[in-house]
């Protein structure tokens, strides 16, 4: 991939459209891995075609688990991070930036609402989601602050609230070493064994 398996991303998008939780879970797991191999020429296509499907997964609270929804954020983060690393060196950067200007605002509104709420100390899925949201916001603030100009105050307020409430979670998980007793997993792992960290 991408040279030998060009139909992979369209196939995974079809799996996302199916909407069946177990199929979407598998597709998101694959997309996280595949997103590490996306080239600068593919970024505009991915933003145009994939971001709307990722947003549908992310906003389907009652359908998909928080871990799956966090993976939607992970794929988004990797695409935006790739754009930020390429900068003006890529011909597709200007195109991708215009696409981000239309696709990112709905995400930001959801991020602000989610991040500002209280974080339960034993909810690993919620923690995964918020870590990924903060990573996305960090890249956007550093590289594309113009995308946040209309909602910067709201985002900063939400991030501040998140930092203030995460102190208790950090103490619970890291300082005291407590974890979710009812879940048969390491508190630093998600349900698929991927590492979660508030360090």
Image: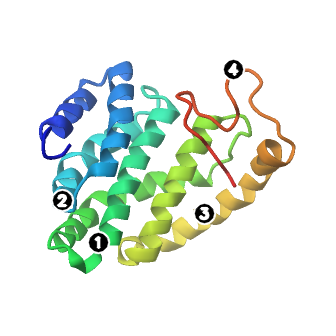
Query: Which residue does the image show at 72% across and 34% down from the upper left?
Result: 122
Residue 117 in the image: x percent, y percent? 63, 49
- Up the image or down, 174 lies above or below 105; here it is above
Label 1's element?
helix
Please state if 31 lies on the left or on the right of 130 as rendered.
left
Residue wearing tag 1: 86
Foreground tag (2 vs 1): 1
Residue wearing tag 4: 184
Mark 2 is surrounded, within 10 Å at the Cα level, by few (under 14), some (14 to 19) or many (20 or more) other residues, namely many
Please state if 69 lies on the left or on the right of 89 as rendered.
right
Label 2's element?
helix
Residue 140 in the image: x percent, y percent? 42, 69
C-alpha separation, residue under disc 2 versus residue under disc 4: 40 Å
Query: Which residue does the image show at 69% across and 30% down from the upper left?
Result: 186
Mark 1 is surrounded, within 10 Å at the Cα level, by few (under 14), some (14 to 19) or many (20 or more) other residues, namely some
Residue wearing tag 3: 159
C-alpha separation, residue under disc 2 versus residue under disc 1: 13 Å
Foreground tag (3 vs 4): 4
- For marks 2 and 4, the one nearer the N-term is 2
Residue wearing tag 2: 44
- For marks 1 and 4, the one nearer the N-term is 1
Residue 115 in the image: x percent, y percent? 58, 53
Query: Which residue does the image show at 25% across and 52% down from the upper left?
Result: 38
Please state if 24 lies on the left or on the right of 111 as rendered.
left
């Amino acid at each position: 991939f991408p040279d030998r398996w060009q139909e992979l991303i369209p196939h995974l998008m079809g799996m996302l459209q199916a909407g069946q939780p177990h199929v979407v879970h598998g597709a998101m797991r694959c997309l996280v891995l595949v997103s590490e191999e996306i080239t600068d020429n593919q970024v505009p296509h991915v933003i145009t075609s994939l971001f709307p499907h990722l947003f549908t997964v992310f906003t389907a609270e009652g359908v998909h688990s928080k871990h799956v929804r966090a993976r939607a954020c992970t794929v988004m983060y990797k695409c935006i991070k790739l754009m930020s690393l390429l900068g003006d060196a890529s011909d597709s950067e200007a195109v991708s930036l215009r696409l981000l200007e239309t696709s990112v605002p709905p995400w930001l509104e959801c991020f602000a609402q989610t991040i500002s709420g209280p974080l339960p100390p034993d909810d690993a899925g919620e923690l995964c989601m918020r870590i990924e949201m903060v990573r996305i916001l960090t890249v956007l603030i550093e590289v594309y602050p113009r995308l946040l100009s209309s909602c910067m105050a709201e985002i900063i307020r939400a991030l501040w609230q998140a930092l203030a409430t995460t102190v208790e979670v950090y103490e619970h998980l890291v300082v005291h070493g407590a974890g979710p007793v009812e879940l048969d997993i390491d508190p630093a792992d998600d349900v698929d064994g991927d590492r979660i960290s508030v360090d």
